[in-house]
Image (tube, rainbow, N blue to C red):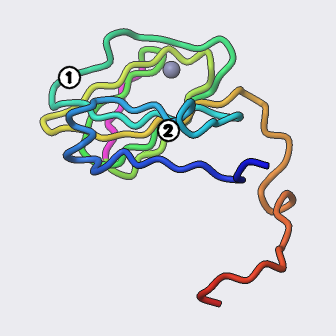
Amino acid sequence: MGKNYSIMNIGSFQKDLAIKRRVMAGQELGLTGCEISFNHMPAGKANPFIHKHKLNEEVYIIVSGKGVFMIDGEEFAVQEGSVIRVAPAGERILKAGTEDMVYICIQAQNNSLTQATADDGVISELKASWR
Ligand code: ZN
């Protein structure tokens, strides 16, 4: 029986990710319900194209920096702490401002979540070393 978890380390968002630019987690972690990318966008740079999706919604989490998001022709400022959900049909592009921007993008099939965590969680009898 395989382990019930997988782990990866992408290093420092500010240093290591700045070199790699984009790290995808799906394959390395064996994700089955979503894809997660960790992104470092240099100051003044933008995504190479405007895109939308066929099936997947995306959640963008701005970890650091500031930038401008354009969705369906509407532009708005984003910064550290901004969390933006984009429906599959939303035509989107993200641009970093005057400083580098780090963001996480989580992609999952639209309408695939059929229940919430509170109903899905089951309390375990297992003991941890610190309890
Ligand atoms: Zn996308």
Q: Is residue 32 above or below residue 83?
A: above
How far, Cα to Cα, is label 1 from label 2? 19 Å
Q: Secondary structure at mark 2?
A: strand
In depth, the one of 130 and 22 nearer the eye is 130
Residue contact at pointers 1 and 2, CB within 8 angstroms: no
In depth, the one of 68 and 126 nearer the eye is 126
User: Which residue in the protein does label 2 denote?
Assistant: 84
Residue 68, percent from left and from top: 30, 30
Instruction: Please identify the quarter of the rendering in which residue 43 is found.
Output: top left
> Is 92 placed left or right of 53 in the picture?
left
Q: Is residue 58 above or below residue 115?
A: above
User: Which residue in the protein does label 1 denote?
Assistant: 45
The C terminus appears in which quarter of the rendering?
Answer: bottom right
Q: Find out if the beta carbon at label 2 lies less than 8 Å from the nearest ligand 1 atom.
A: no
Instruction: Please identify the quarter of the rendering in which residue 59 is found.
Output: top right
Residue 103, percent from left and from top: 37, 39
In depth, the one of 26 and 107 nearer the eye is 26
> Is 92 placed left or right of 3 in the picture?
left
Q: Which residues are magenta?
A: 74-79
Residue 86, percent from left and from top: 56, 28
Q: Secondary structure at mark 1?
A: loop
The residue lying at 82 percent from left, 74 percent from top is 124
Query: Label 2 amino acid?
Result: Ile
- Sequence-wise first label, 1 or 2: 1
Q: Is residue 102 magenta?
A: no
Query: Label 1 amino acid?
Result: Lys
> Is 74 placed left or right of 99 in the picture?
right
The residue lying at 36 percent from left, 9 percent from top is 49
Mark 1 is surrounded, within 10 Å at the Cα level, by few (under 14), some (14 to 19) or many (20 or more) other residues, namely: some
